[in-house]
Image (cartoon, helix red, strand yellow):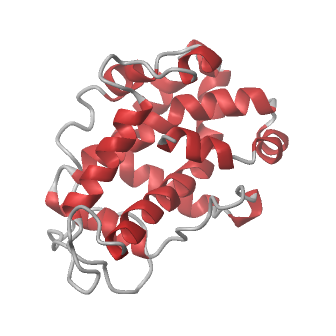
Amino acid sequence: MTALDDILGALPAEQISQQVGASPDEVRTAAAAMLPALLGGLQANAGNPAGAGSILSALAQHDDDLLTGGTDLSAIDEQDGSAIASHIFGDQQDEVVNRLGALPAVGGSGAGGDLVKKLLPILAPMVLSWLAGRVLKGAGDGGASGGSAGGKAPAEPAGSPALPRGTGSAPGSLDDLLRDVLGSAVGGSAGPSGSTEGVEASAGFDPGSILGDVLGGLLGGGRR
């Protein structure tokens, strides 16, 4: 299963639909369009050592089991989700929201943008939980990087924005595993040909176009 399958499978679409004023199908379709952008934004951040360290520190402070058995909307901290999305996209967040909202699959401009804004704080914690489960548990199982959870994450330059986290210690040097997981997740959401079987057919859009057209060069340098 891909990251998209895992997260969408745990999405509490019925609960969310009542909160955001959209149908469950509209919620699922919009989420399927937004998740590749969130994963792609994290991948762009992880391309920079300081950005990777920020993500790893955040993963250590977030629930890695949020998706198990389906997510309960009440278990999602939307204030935390807003902060996560803000740090992923930085000052390009409005641009990303506008481009996602303009996709026909999301409803086009106007209503589409409003739905994206409402869903971002819900989806961001789910993405971080999925990533924590893959990276931190993968490291514990002797993941690809071979990193130890007892080490220190790369130091961040003074004044650099970081993903929201608690006061606990950062996880180990897991940069390679983090990048491997995100690379597979983004590749699984949008393959080399720019399409994903099943997702494209059901949602009416090409996930590959989101990574190329929506993110484009906005996050190419990786945030710190």
Residue 90 at least partly seen: no
Count of marks placed on residues? 0
Expressed as whole percent of the image width and height from the top left, the position of residue 5 reads: 57, 39
Q: Is residue 222 above or below residue 24?
A: below
Residue ID at (73%, 27%): 26
In the picture, measured across the screen, residue 19 lies left or right of residue 9, that is right
The single residue placed furthest to the front in the displayed view is 141
Residue drawn at (38%, 24%) of the image: 214
Looking at the rendering, which quadrant does residue 193 occupy? Answer: top left
At 33% from the left and 86% from the top, the residue drawn is 169
- x, y (%) of residue 14? 82, 42
The vertical placement of 218 against 61, above or below, is above
Please indicate whether residue 219 sits to the left or right of residue 113 in the image: left
From the viewer's perspective, tell me whether residue 170 is left or right of residue 173: right
Report the side of 223 relative to 37 (left or right).
left
Question: Residue 13 or 162: which is nearer the viewer?
Answer: 13
Image height of 154 relative to 6, above or below = below
Q: Position of residue 180 (x, y in %)?
A: 26, 51
Locate residue 120: give its quadrant.
top right
Q: Is residue 194 above or below residue 185?
A: above
Residue drawn 35% across the image and 25% down it: 191
Picture quadrant of residue 73: bottom right
Residue 132: x, y in percent? 44, 64
Does the rendering let one see residue 84?
yes
Classify the position of the C terminus by image quarter.
bottom left
